[in-house]
Amino acid sequence: MKIRVWALIAVGILSAGGYFGVTHVVALRAHDRAQRAIRIQDWRAVRSELQTYLNVFPSDDSARLNLAEAFFKDARLDPERAISSAIQQLGHVQRESPLFPAARIQEARMSLFARLQPQRAESLLREAMATDPNNVDAHYVLWKLHDLTGRSHLAEPQFRKVLESTPSEQRPFRLREWYMSQFYPATANPEIDQLMGFLVPGAVHTAVMELRRLETFRDREPSAALNHAAVARWYSLEGDPKAALLLLQKALDVAEAPLQEPFFVATLTQVLFDLGEFDNALKHYRAWPGEVVGYEHSRLGAILADEVARDYGRAVRGYREVIAVWPGQADWRIQYRLARCLAKAGDESAAETMRGQAKQVELLMEEDVHSPLRRMLETPAQLEICQRMTQFYEQLGLVYEMQQWRDQVNRLQSESHRTGRSRTQ
Amino acid sequence: MRWVTWVGICTFLAFAGCRDADSPNRVEPAGAELSGAQKSRAQDLREAREDLKAVLTRHEPSDVGSFPLFTEVTANSGLEFSFHTDAIPGRYFLPEIMGGGAAWFDFDRDGWLDLFLVNGDELAAGTLGPKRHADVLFHNRGGQGFEEISGAASAGTTGYGQGCAVGDFDGDGFEDLYVTGYRTSMLLHNLGDGTFSDATPESGTLNELWGASVVWLDINDDRILDLYVVNYLDVTFENQQHCRFNGVAGYCGPGHYEAVSDRLFLNLGDGKFRDVSDEVGIAIPNGKGLGVTVLDFDLDGQNEIYVANDMTPNFLFQRLASRDRAGHPDVVGGLPRYRNVAPIAGCAVSDMGQNEASMGVTCADFDNNGFYDIFVTNFYAQKNTLYRNLGGLQFEDDSRRSRIVAMSYDRLGFGTVAFDYDRDGSSDLFIANGHVLGPAHKPFEMLPQILHNDGQARFDDVGSRAGDYFRHLYVGRGAAGADYDNDGDLDLLVTHLDRPIALLRNETVTRNHFLGIELQRADRLPPHGTQVIVEAGPRRIFSMSVGGGSYLCASDSRLLIGLGDWSDPVTVEIRWQSGEVVRHDKIAVDRYWLAIEGRPLLPPVKGVPTP
């Protein structure tokens, strides 16, 4: 009797062992097939194989990421279902996992480029960056997100992080991207606008296309105050503050905690100021949410000190802060304002100097200057183009960019010398 | 038994919970703190909603005391005139798009303002042949309509006309006309019998540049009128540029052409003039001028000249007050020197240092601080600009606080008239709008505007309630104000590119009162810069006689001062440019008065009815 029992147990163990052994082998083979399928971009096969594999190895986050990508990229699936499935897979990647930042970034990409939900994307990117502050992918996507939502003035730290981790010979291309962000932010990313379906290949970017993008963001993510503010900002910049205010008013009813979003408050303050509603503008400026720092906060503070309080000393200090940081360095209007305040504060000599500086910057913002630069930048990794860009940024007083382009000049010159030497040898 | 135990435990927990909640020393859970913050946020949101609702309500024309009402009476008045633009499809020659002016003046001195309308002509036919599209003079039949007379045509006007100004250059008591045009000009001498002669050749006032607005003024205190001609661009068929905007052909703007300097013609007193532009210092390069006005901005007894330039900084010419060792004013060969002080005065560019594309200009004391402010109409997607006069020839761009920005980004303004349409004692604004790129570009036609001033130089656009004319789109250009029917309110004449002129009779219903004053200097020169202060009970209302203004046009030179609901007699203080200050007490309101320097106020001799 006892022998029978032990035999039964042994058979059971062996069967279980066999079963596990077989399923492991099957799973590992599935994983191998999945890798091959990834190489040939057979996303359906990737999905099938990785699902088999993950049944056995559910904690393999790398496979989760690949499976998510397979869902995302499989054109045969219903897009919304595909994205939901991909995001579901990414949700399995826990905070303790080394792949947590990668999973969040991937989800952020899907949220931004496929679901057109920038605020969701931004919060995912910030989660990723909280775990891995130097994650270049996160910085890169956030840079683009700032461009796409009309907040390119916030993108400089991300650009620098990305540039620092870019190989030297690739940097002219990154620097070109940054130039576009700086001077043509609304149209800086035609590939992304194509990906998101706002721009037909071969078509030209227009202001209306930008509005359509911003409105779509708002409609896809109506609770995000950021998106409402971006549409209102567009109208404000187009010179229709009343329409902007109507949009912001509606947002107060729809968006979640709009007065806690600095971009919303900045836009509201600007619009109220443009409408001549100085008291209301001041009220919202004073209730600025979160940290009271940054370009927008300084700029609005200085303008309000200038035009509302007529406190020219304070305005001068504020404007000086503003023109010390991007995009203040290129904002000749602010520089003229500073000149005027300097004159009002009694420093005519400094005012004259500032007027001269503002004039120089104003001339550098002319289309006549930028059209040839844009044309040249189609092929940025050339010596004379790098030299021209160095000169442009030097004239503008943007030292970091100037140094970066100069480094490229030096690199290309030394490469040229090396090539010359090897030829002579 | 088990369920009894469970009930016991649950009861204990429930009571324990109650006791804890009732405890005065309880610590608020985190959730309660969040609720407090949420409450505060909700309160902020509620306040913001109410604030924004109030702001938007303020920006609707609902809180204005009395709405303007202007009725178009052009056809009923016998006025029929369309400016001949000579626009040829596809040619895009810039003068075609700039429009023509008009002048209100009493050419026959019958007390009723007549109307002169400048016409274009065929541009390709050259500039010196007889006009195929004549300028027209309409005689005012005692406020009962107009009839076209051949007075102006009798002078045989030539060339493609643009702007005009009214002034009695020979002191014969009849006001003459100067007409600017595309590379030509005309000085039309009013012979007093209803006819005009062309005095251009012998006077030496031919301006062969592209002239726009023009103003008469006495620059050297010799008591005869000199002439300031604003010049625009050097555009010819030879140097014409071809532009496309978003791929569609249109008129190239001032950025594609060189400027041509303004001209100042000194009246020598014998029917001849001399070009003294360089000598007096007004021939500044890079002034692409369109509008001009003359008045005493700093109340120093000397008039300044303000020129609105298109995409280049505006000019403010101040007559230099310095004197030589002998105590004589700083003069060159008997001429004063002028200096452009606009950059240091703060009225050359916008608050952001931007050269604005200025077209028309009008001045009034919008904030009632005693100093005349400057309002300039600008390009589409730029703001119009209100330069507030702080005194001491210092201005600041007050366009945002005044809400001008909010109402002007989507318009392209040309002619503009400052006037108190509802007689509430604050100057309001009329603006004629219309684009310049050409009909293929949208928007091309635009709504005209009437901006109501709340008394603190804060404006509301009340055009939508101002009558049928204001509900339609036009390509507006010139605008000139006049009380052509002498009923105590200012009517408007608007010139267009795309349709005939419009005469808008002011029929605003108001119980407010007015005072009309026609100023006449002892030397019979135009009283530009003469200040009139009306004391109506506790209110002091400042007015000034202004030369030029608007775009290509000349308005009624009489002062029409709104008094609000004050109906009792008022005190009128007149500060003449000679330095004489005269107070006239107990002046009855709701009528016109003739103020001749050195004499008591008189009722006007002719034309103007008194109640």
Image (tube, coloured by chain):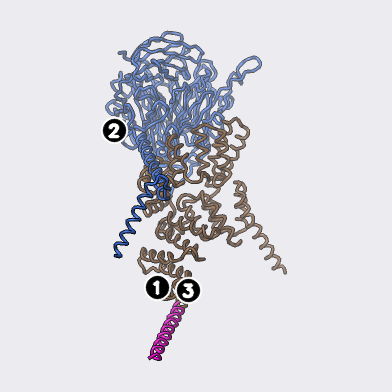
Chain colours: A brown, B blue
Residue A376 in the image: state x and y as whole percent. Answer: 56, 55
Name the kind of residue labelled 2 in the image. Answer: Asp
Whether residue A268 is situated above or below residue B228 in the rendered picture: below
Instruction: Please identify, in this view, whether the residue under mark 2 or under mark 1 is nearer the observer.
Output: 1
> Where is the N terminus of chain B found, in terms of image quarters?
bottom left
Residue at label 1?
A44
Query: Can you tell which quarter of the image residue B161 is in?
Result: top left
Name the kind of residue labelled 1 in the image. Answer: Arg
Query: Can you tell which quarter of the image residue B41 is in?
Result: top left
Asked whether the viewer can see residue B206, the reply is no
Chain of the residue under the numbered disc 1 shown in the image: A
How packed is label 3: few (under 14 Cα within 10 Å), some, or many (20 or more)? few
How packed is label 1: few (under 14 Cα within 10 Å), some, or many (20 or more)? some
Number of callouts in the render? 3
Whether residue A59 is situated above or below residue B250 in the rendered picture: below
Residue at label 2?
B468
Chain of the residue under the numbered disc 2 shown in the image: B
**1 or 3: tag closer to the N-terminus:** 3
Residue B83 in the image: state x and y as whole percent. Answer: 37, 33
Do the residues at pointers 1 and 3 share their chain? yes
Residue at label 3?
A39
Which region is colored magenta? Answer: A1-30
Secondary structure state at the residue bearing disc 2:
helix
- Residue ID at (55%, 18%): B220
